[in-house]
Image: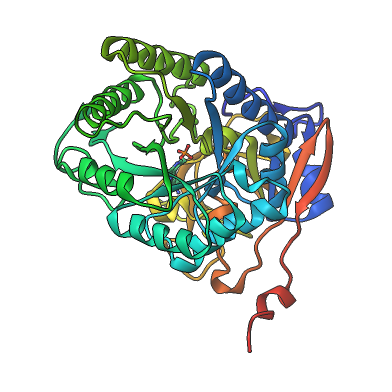
Amino acid sequence: MLHQQNLTVNAAGHLAVGGVDAVALAGEYGTPLYVLDEDMVRERMRLYRDVMAQAFPAGSRPYYASKALCCKALCAWAHEEGLGLDAVSAGEIYTALAAGVPAADICFHGNAKTEAELRCAIASGVGLIAADGEEELARIDAVAAALHARPRVLLRVTPGIDPHTFAAVNTGVVDVKFGVPIPTGQALAATRTALGMKHMDLAGFHCHIGSQIFDASPFHLEVDVMLSFLDQVRRELGYTVGVLDLGGGFAVPYTEDEPVPDCEEMLRRTAERLDARCRELDYPAPAVLMEPGRGIVGAAGVTLYTVQNVKSVPGGSTFAAVDGGMGDNPRYALYGARHSAVIADRAGDPADRRVTIAGRCCESGDLVGEDVPLQAPRAGDTLAVLVTGAYNYSMASNYNRVPRPPIVALRGGESRIIVRRETAEDLVRLDV
Ligand code: LLP
């Protein structure tokens, strides 16, 4: 089984999450069920918060990327633990405000924000808006003027870094939908535009180089490219930034063959690099924001299913068909993303089979994984898919009109519902 401190095998031979028996949870709440270890989420939040406060310049802090898992409870936990919140739609902003997150702690992102969303964000007083280009700068300015507001804006730039090859390139990775490219000169031009706007303050820059980053090297490169850019902006436009948002991307291991990244080390080494570059350039150290999503919630989540049918095709695969699938976890169908799994009823047994975990939707691509090492599955077993805290609930759908599962949070060995199960009534609620 995936090595993770909060996943154990109890005396009954069952999988326990945060000390709570997974088979009992499935019995109590039904399946499919998202289980989230709240203690672990809060611990991760505090780790990012404390290391950023210690290692980075004054004012630095993490913003939880709520796209990874957005519901009122998560927004409230992030606020209680002292994090800001990265929201990417009016819906995420609404959820955060409904959870009691002060608007000033929200950074509003998005590469295609609508005017209505900008109005909602500016009227509610969000602390930062990450603008995605020239047109959006103009749109923010117009909305701000109409609302007699003066939002603080970050300009989202594209540094041209591929985190998985560690090489800075001038084409290819700047040819993406997000942000204004630095290498083409467009970022400098957009900065000039932003500085000329009458109804906003340019607070600094935002960039995000990708996801599932396992070590500090790509962040070093990001710091290097950004500091060179900041220096160029200072020289050519006379503008010195106060805020540098380096985005998210901290990896979590999904399978046993992936390394366990040391995020504290990654943060500290990134802070050292920033410090060194600022000294070299004699640049006043900006407050740094980072936006971990997966790194906070990913490993804290487990999804429980009930095995409905098991089929072995002679010379082919063994299929365990479960009562969920791409509707609650589209990651394999979308990206071929791998997750570890375990039969919760016999978690101590050797995972000596290779099993294809099949979802319930009428679609042959609805799989949770293929050739997943697993104990021999039987109908009625509770099957646990691990590391599903990030981008599962938040990307779930009602395909085939399957209701979305509830989320149960575990804290101090106790469980409670934080998002209830959808009902058939919920499914027809919007039908006219
Ligand atoms: N900040 C920005 C601007 C982002 O675009 C993202 C993720 C994050 C922060 C958080 O990144 P994280 O720390 O979670 O890696 N659905 C995909 C992941 C998409 C990530 C999109 N942006 C998946 O299931 O793997």
Q: In which image quadrant can residue 219 be found?
A: top left
Q: Residue furthest bottom?
A: 432
Residue at 49% of width from left, 18% of height from top?
A: 57
Quadrant observed for ligand 1 in the rendered image: top left
Q: Nearer the viewer, residue 50 or 166?
A: 50
Image quarter of the C terminus: bottom right
Q: Quadrant of the N terminus?
A: top right
Residue 183 lies left or right of residue 429; in this view the side is left
Please report the residue visible at 63 percent of the width from the left and 58 percent of the height from the top: 94
Tell me if 269 is positioned left or right of 125 in this view: left
Give x and y (percent) for residue 403.
66, 67
Residue placed at 70% from the left, 51% from the top? Answer: 72
Q: Is residue 99 visible?
A: yes
Location of residue 98 by image quarter:
bottom right
Q: Relative to residue 271, is residue 213 depicted above or below?
A: below
| Residue sitting nearer the eye, 125 or 340 | 125
Between 29 and 191, which is closer to the camera in this rendering? 191
Q: Position of residue 34 (x, y in %)?
A: 67, 49
Left/right of residue 314 with respect to residue 3 in the rendered view: left
Kindly tell me whether residue 359 is visible in this rendering: no
Q: Give the residue at x 75% y 47%.
A: 408
Between residue 48 and residue 327, name the one nearer to us. Answer: 48
Looking at the image, residue 417 lies above or below residue 338:
below
- Image position, residue 186 (x, y; %): 19, 45
Horizontal placement of 410 versus 154: left or right? right
